Structure formats: structure tokens, C-alpha cells
Amino acid sequence: MGLFDFVKGIGKKNTAPAEPQAAPATPAEPSAQEVANKLLGLIKSLGLGVEGLSVTYNGTTDLATIKGQVKSQADKEKIVLAVGNVDHVAQVDDQMTVEAPEPESKFYTVKSGDNLSKISKEYYGDPNQYNKIFEANRPLLKNADDIFPGQVLRIPQ
């Protein structure tokens, strides 16, 4: 997939537990290693199987790089979106591979006033297909009203 751009500072605060680190630092801004550890914890909390998972974060460019192998294109896209929709991340470099490649989903950046029904009408011509978008973004979304401006969502074909 490559490099994805996100809006820095609008994403959800990353509250996933960090992977353990040797010497915890507590500066005002989290270190690159702390952010990478939290992103790694976030990905693991999704319950999507990733073999050989590694995450690095460059605090200067706000770039998160993800490596590993996933079973499906959907899992890969969910991981990219989970990481990109975190407030410290402006770009995600997707270096993951997929066991069984399949067509990529479209992506949509939520605007003020949007809801899943409105997005569904735009993409499918039917506002009642919103559940297709909701399911495509689980476990990132807990309920259909849990979207915010600037968030990027998967739109399945």
C-alpha cells in the first residue's frame, strides 16, 4: 500500500498499554520509542493476527512505520487506519505483506456533519448500507456514531 497521510493532532489519544520498555522516560512530549510502544500495544489490542509485527516512529516527521504479515487486506487496512487515527501520527508507512492479496478498499476522510448513513449514500447510493462501513471499521469503531472529523475510514467495495 505504501505511505498514507493523516491529519496530525485530531486523532484519538492513544490509551492502549505500551509494550514494556527498559527505562521508562517521562518527558512532557513522549519519546519516539514511547509512541512506537503505544502504537504496538494499540495494534495488539485490536486482536488482528500479525506475524513479525514491528512498529517504529519518527518524532521529527511524525511517521509511523509498520512491518509484519497479515492474513487479509482488511486486517492490513484496519491496522494502518488504527495507527493513522492516533493524534501523534501524521503519516503511516505501510510495509506489511498480505498472505492472500485482494482488492484494496477505498478510504474516506470524515468531514464535519458526516455520519455513516450520509457516507453510505455517497458511496453506495443507499443510506441504509451504513452497517457495511461500520463492520468494515470494527474494532476501530465501537458504535456507528463514534466518528470524528479528520478520521479516515475504510469503505469496502
Image: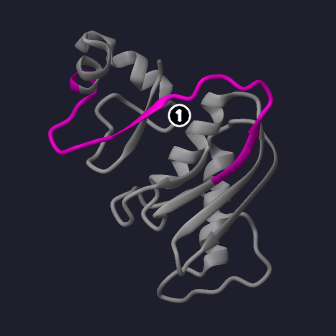
| Residue that extends furthest to the left in the rendered view of this protein | 113
Residue at 47% over, 68% down: 88
Depicted 125 relative to depicted 57: above or below: above
Colour treatment of the image = one colour
Residue at 33% over, 38% down: 146
Residue stretch in magenta: 94-118
Relative to the observer, which residue lies in front, 90 or 36? 90
Q: Amino acid at mark 1?
A: Pro
Q: Residue at label 1?
A: 139
Q: How many badges with numbers are in the image?
A: 1
Q: Decide whether residue 137 is among the magenta residues.
A: no
Residue at 31% over, 40% down: 147
In percent of width and height, residue 35 lies at 59, 70
Left/right of residue 109 with respect to residue 3 in the rendered view: left
| Residue that extends furthest to the bottom in the rendered view of this protein | 27
Relative to the observer, which residue lies in front, 49 or 143? 49
In percent of width and height, residue 133 lies at 40, 23
Left/right of residue 101 with respect to residue 131 in the rendered view: right
Which of the 4 quarters of the picture holds residue 19?
bottom right
Relative to the observer, which residue lies in front, 33 or 6? 6
**Label 1: few (<14), some (14–19) or many (≥20) C-alpha neighbours in 10 Å:** some
In percent of width and height, residue 111 lies at 22, 44
Which of the 4 quarters of the picture holds residue 38?
bottom right
Depicted 151 relative to depicted 136: above or below: below
Residue at 64% over, 48% down: 43
Depicted 62 relative to depicted 86: above or below: below
In the rendered image, the quadrant that contains the N terminus is top right
Left/right of residue 92 with respect to residue 149 in the rendered view: right
Q: Secondary structure at mark 1?
A: loop
In percent of width and height, residue 17 lies at 62, 60
Q: Decide whether residue 103 is among the magenta residues.
A: yes
